Image (spheres, rainbow, N blue to C red):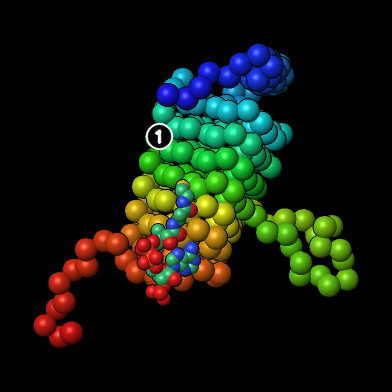
Amino acid sequence: MAAKPKGLARLLRKLDSISTRLGMRLKRRYLLALGQTAIAADASVSWSANINLRWSSSGGTVLKIGGRTKIRENTYLSTRGGSITIGKRCTVNPFCVMLAEGPITIGDDVIIGHSSSVIAFDHRFDDPETPIAQQGDIAKPTTIEDNVWIGAGARILGGVTIGRGAIVAAGSVVTKPVPAGAIVGGVPAKVLRNRLPQPPASPED
Ligand SMILES: CC(C)(COP(=O)(O)OP(=O)(O)OC[C@H]1O[C@@H](n2cnc3c(N)ncnc32)[C@H](O)[C@@H]1OP(=O)(O)O)[C@@H](O)C(=O)NCCC(=O)NCCS
């Protein structure tokens, strides 16, 4: 059984949870004032401290989270004018970053290992005479389908779809679509093998 925190540790934990709740309450009040329903999270969602949201100026729901999903500590969810939708029974482990200039859509039963990123945009860089920072961004819709496992420290780049049941090895950089059931790994990520039963070979093979 885990030891109960004592004295100062207990007080610090209490203060942290109070400030988190206060932060959420203040943000909600601000959003109500704007007439937005920005967050649609099921009551069973478990939130941890330090989740940061940047709201869309156009209004509407920018963050949707399904039932029994867990968002762990120090995850940074930034909607950047896009939207983030996370399905049911997912786990987003600590220190993940999601930047949703294009929409980020995550299905049900997805596990995202700690320190991973989903980056749904690129900076424009076509004009060599203008600083990249002044050229604007390209939104890139990015999708992770049901039952995907993303290993720790992976980078999922914009415009990619990771098919249902796929696995992304730890530390991979995913730059291309991943077929359903594939295990991919490396930089850039390549198919290592397929975990789904393959159809029987046809007589011509
Ligand atoms: C992807 C993974 C599940 C594969 O497991 P596995 O099937 O047992 O893989 P193996 O160890 O048998 O390796 C198979 C091949 O994949 C390669 N590979 C494994 N992990 C890799 C990685 N992270 N990056 C690149 N290649 C990798 C191996 O080098 C091996 O290549 P080879 O056949 O040319 O020698 C595992 O390596 C992994 O990355 N797990 C993620 C752990 C994690 O992040 N946990 C956090 C919990 S949410």
Quarter of the image with the C terminus in it: bottom left
Query: Looking at the image, can residue 197 be seen?
Result: yes
Q: Quadrant of ligand 1?
A: bottom left
Q: Secondary structure at mark 1?
A: loop
Q: Farthest residue in the left direction?
A: 203
Q: Is residue 185 visible?
A: no
- Specify the quadrant of the image occupied by residue 87: top left
Which residue is the extreme one toward the bottom? 204
Establish if 122 lies above or below 83: below
Residue 103 in picture, x, y percent from top left: 56, 46
Residue 144, position in %: x, y? Answer: 46, 50
Position in image of residue 172 (x %, y %): 53, 63
The relative height of residue 138 versus residue 70 in the rendered view (above or below) is below
> Residue 12 occupies which quadrant of the picture?
top right
Q: Residue at x 46, y 20 (%)?
A: 43
Residue shown at the point (57%, 40%) measured from the top left: 94
**Residue at image x 39%, y 35%?**
89
Compare residues 127 and 46 and report the one nearer the observer: 46
In this orientation, which residue lies closer to the viewer: 1 or 142? 1
Residue 197 in the figure: left or right of residue 71: left
Q: Within 10 Å of the Cα at label 1, are there few (<14), some (14-19), or many (20+) other Cα atoms? A: many
Please indicate whether residue 35 sits to the left or right of residue 1 in the image.
right
Label 1 CB, ligand 1: below 8 Å? no
- Number of numbered markers: 1
Q: Say what amino acid the circle numbered 1 marks.
A: Lys
- Residue 133: percent from left, percent from top: 82, 57
- Looking at the figure, which quarter contains the N terminus? top left
Q: Residue at x 68, y 42 (%)?
A: 80
Looking at the image, residue 162 sits to the left or right of residue 101; the answer is: left
Give the residue number, with chain letter if any, for mark 1: 88
